[in-house]
Image (spheres, helix red, strand yellow):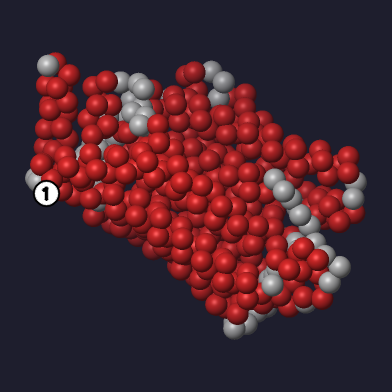
Amino acid sequence: MSHGHNHHAASKSLFEQRGNFYLKASPVARGAVVFCILVGIISIVMGMKSGFSTRVWGAIVFNTFFFFAISLGGSAFSAMQDILSTKWGRPVMRLHESFSSFLPVAALIFFSTLLCVKFDIAGARNVWVWIANPDMLHHFWGKRTWLSENSWLIRDAVAIGIILLLAGWQMRLKIGRDRAMAAGRHEEAVKLGKSAYEKLRYWSAPLLVCYAITFSLLGFDLLMSLAPTWLSTLWGGWLFAIMMQTLMASLLITMWVFKDTAIGLHIRQQQFHDVGKLMHGFTIFFAYLTYAHVLTYWYGNMPEETQYFIARLEQPWIFIVLGAPIFSFLLPLYTMIPKAAKWTKMVGGTIAIGILMAQWATFLLVVQPQVVAPADMTLPWVEIGAFFGVFGLFIMSIFTFGSKIPMVAIGDPLLHEAIDAGHH
């Protein structure tokens, strides 16, 4: 009786506060977003006019993939929790689900890139060298078969389309119940909530399998094939580790941003603690897979494998090789061990920012050495400019999403239970 009363009280409280759960961006925030997008556009145009077309395309690809991974991670993490019917993450689930609003924007950028490659617009065909020079794969039968231009274009377009369809279906189930609740249609919201709960618990596992396959495929095709004679069988898992580590870092920062607002009303110390633990755990997982990469190539000592790393041990890339692991592994590993670090803004938030900066540099290290001459990288102005542009689009997507959809999942039956039941 008491549990039912508490559940009803939680539901009533969420309904009464529903107007406060929408994201109302201030004019300053919107102006900052527009400024970031303009910086990106100006950097891209200047880069193209300066004769750095392949460098510009590389910057667009790795920056978009960086935020694309965080966005898809938001949907994937939601699916993971729906499989297990977890309650602890319900107060923050809509925050990382809002990241997925960037997926259509990322898809548009990727589709545009593929079209530019196909029709050789602005030098896009020169980015993936095996397209411009397919004979270089003559002695690599497997790669020659896989890296065929038309099949590459088609399967990547299909993979992006699949991700859009599945993530869209997932989010429609999630927000349908919230919209009904916000409109005061309680009975409909309850029915939609139960229906979504059952469907997501059943279908989230195959959903994750599809996400894993399509994300890995895009990682192989868009990033690894930039160095067509090199191969890593750990690539998909390594990118997944980066995805989840950067997702947790982004989520932790977002939680702090909304902590003292109505949207963060039900975010407790336990949520900060658990997200901090996950960020710490994926830090170790990322380091393990990175070490596995380096170790196997070191003791194998095969030229077609080691040349990929040797090229990145020269200036200016060596600074990233030495610096990124400090902020993506060493500092988080030891700093996040104490419990208090996970819910202390100055510690956890600072480490999260360091992780995002380091992993952005890691993506730069993957892509740009394949498309930029070291002598041209005295200052990474194109890469930083493109970052601001894509970051602006990412934040704009969240603002647009949050202005229409409650940033608290008020129709989620497990949220109502989580508010009273605590940690599960």
The amino acid sitting under disc 1 is Ala
Q: Nearer the viewer, residue 263 or 80?
A: 80
Q: Secondary structure at mark 1?
A: loop
In the image, is 9 to the left or to the right of 118? left
**Farthest top residue?**
2
Q: Nearer the viewer, residue 262 or 165?
A: 165
Q: Is residue 281 above or below residue 186?
A: above
Q: Is residue 74 above or below residue 219?
A: above
Residue 86 rendering spot, x and y as whole percentages? 37, 29
Residue positioned 31% across, 33% down in the render: 91
In the image, is 402 to the left or to the right of 56? left
Question: Which residue is under mark 1?
Answer: 183
Residue 82: quadrant of the picture = top left
Residue positioned 40% across, 31% down in the render: 84
In the image, is 7 to the left or to the right of 47? left
Residue 137 rendering spot, x and y as whole percentages? 81, 69
Residue 355 rendering spot, x and y as whole percentages? 57, 40
